[in-house]
Amino acid sequence: MWIFKRLKGVIIGRRRESYSGEEVRRHDEVEATRLMEEGMRRLGVEGRDLKSMKKGAAEKMLLAWLVHGRAMVGNSWIAERLLMGTSANIGKYVKVIAMSSDPRIMLLRKKLEKA
């Protein structure tokens, strides 16, 4: 049932399979971009800031966590857009944020959950 919550409002009245691959991919990328922009706004991060931040900066990991959990794009898409180096590390970064008990990270996660 969780998949229906993730797709809520995305594809109304039609099954996801009835859309072509290109339409679905484009929609997923648009949603991932929206989430990333909203997440950056909530964290107070500008696009130009990403280049100067470390690959494993908390803000980048938080954004990766948000997009990974709510949009259907690959780790390479996330790594490329957030300038995080190899896509092989995205899963690790997402897990670090998801499992963190650091009060600062927990507070920022709550802010992003509203995106």
Image (cartoon, grey):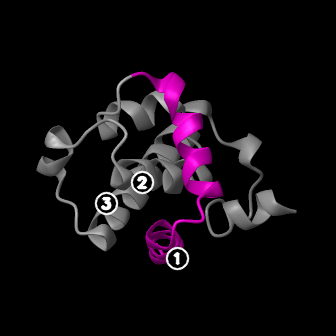
The quadrant in which residue 13 appears is: bottom right
Residue at 78% across, 63% down? 4
The magenta stretch spans residue 90: yes
- Location of residue 82 in the rendering, given as x and y in whole percent from the top left corner: 32, 40
Where is residue 87? Give x, y as percent. 47, 25
Residue at image point 43% right, 71% down: 104
The amino acid sitting under disc 1 is: Lys
Label ID, residue 64: none
> Of marks 3 and 2, which one's residue comes earlier in the chain?
3
Residue at the disc numbered 1 = 110
Q: Position of residue 93 (x, y in %)?
A: 52, 41
Residue placed at 78% from the left, 57% from the top?
Answer: 3
As measured in the structure, the alpha-carbon distance from the residue carrying label 2 to the one carrying label 1 is 12 Å
* Segment colored magenta: 86-115
Q: Which amino acid does label 3 sit on?
A: Glu
Marks 1 and 3 in Cβ contact (< 8 Å) = no
The residue sitting at 43% across, 32% down in the picture is 77
Q: In this view, does 39 lie above or below 26?
A: below
In the picture, measured across the screen, residue 61 lies left or right of residue 94, that is left
The answer to whether residue 99 is magenta is: yes
Which residue is disc 3 drawn over? 37
According to the picture, the residue beneath numbered tag 2 turns out to be 63
Mark 1–mark 3 distance (CA, rounded to whole Å): 16 Å
Provide the major secondary structure of the magenta segment. Answer: helix
User: Which badge, 1 or 3, is on the more N-terminal residue?
Assistant: 3
Q: Which amino acid does label 2 sit on?
A: Leu
Q: Which of 9 and 67 is in front in this view?
A: 67
